[in-house]
Image (cartoon, helix red, strand yellow):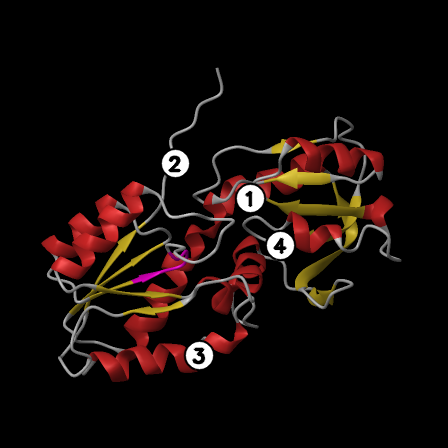
Amino acid sequence: MKIKAFVNHILKRYPLDCQEKWDESGLLSFFDQGQDITSCVICLDITENVVDQALRQNAQIIISHHPIFQKNPDHPINKKEQTIIKRLQDNQISCLCLHTCYDNNKKGMNVVLAQILGFKNFRWFKNDINNEFIMIDLPCGMSVKQIADVFKTKVKHCQMFITNINDDSRLFRHLAICAGSGYDVLSKTFDGNLDSSATLFITGDLKYHNWLTINQFSLYFLDVGHEVENIFVDTIDQYLKQRFHNIRITKIYSEVKKYVI
């Protein structure tokens, strides 16, 4: 199969026009799109290790969740990322980054996460500026510890959990989930008519001032880390293997070293 046809097939499922305005999803092309594809790498982040693996596997393309931002002033490119892009260019390895095209898809990040967790009773919920996340209804209620245990059991890349709840007797009847760094999306509901006293908000990468606001609004949050987004790798792997049987696929997960001392 030609690389151009391969890329177009994926973008038909995850269209670029679904990405957020600030995002840089799309194809970083360093090859002749008319050439055949025989090998690809799927990853969460484009790192030096990913490029090394792509070279070992003679991959023509890397499919990543996160892009290397080059134009966004909030994510200025660093020297390491510049080196990575040069290595990709020198070795004619291209990158297809799906980021918020995948996140905003009805079969994307949050829905896949809900399915992995085993929650079937979920619905889409829009905040005040029409960003979407999913709401899961728990008719019998669950404690934050029970919910964290589900993550630990079913999502292999969750490393640590942070919450502002120290009362395990409190039962939540709704989960508001926005995987990755979803605080900005979830925070647009704080002044709305959401039943916040019975809702546990779940996301990752919460900062000091996020927690300050959360506590001022008397809300309940569970930070499951950004690594949960590694489920992207498995989802795309399954999707490609069902459709392209002659392409060698290599999966690489992002494992960020961090320790509690």
- 136 lies above or below 74: below
The answer to whether the residue labelled 3 contacts the one labelled 1, judged by CB atoms less than 8 Å apart, is no
Examine the image and state in which quarter residue 248 appears: bottom left
Magenta segment main secondary structure: loop
Alpha carbon distance from label 4 to label 1: 14 Å
Q: Which mark is residue 151?
A: 1
Q: Residue furthest right?
A: 193
Q: Is residue 2 left or right of residue 196?
A: left
Q: Is the Cβ of the residue at disc 3 closer than 8 Å to that at disc 2?
A: no
Judge left or right: residue 78 versus residue 227: left
Circle 2: residue type: Val
* Type of amino acid at the residue the image marks with label 3: Arg
C-alpha distance separating marks 2 and 4: 20 Å
Question: Element under label 3?
Answer: helix
Q: Give the mark, 3 or 1, whose residue is nearer the N terminus.
A: 3
What is the spatial separation of the Cα atoms under label 4 and label 3, in whole angstroms?
Answer: 21 Å
What number is the disc on residue 13?
3
Determine which residue is flagged by label 4. Answer: 178
- The disc label shown at residue 256, or none: 2
Could you tell me residue 141's position as x and y percent?
Answer: 78, 47
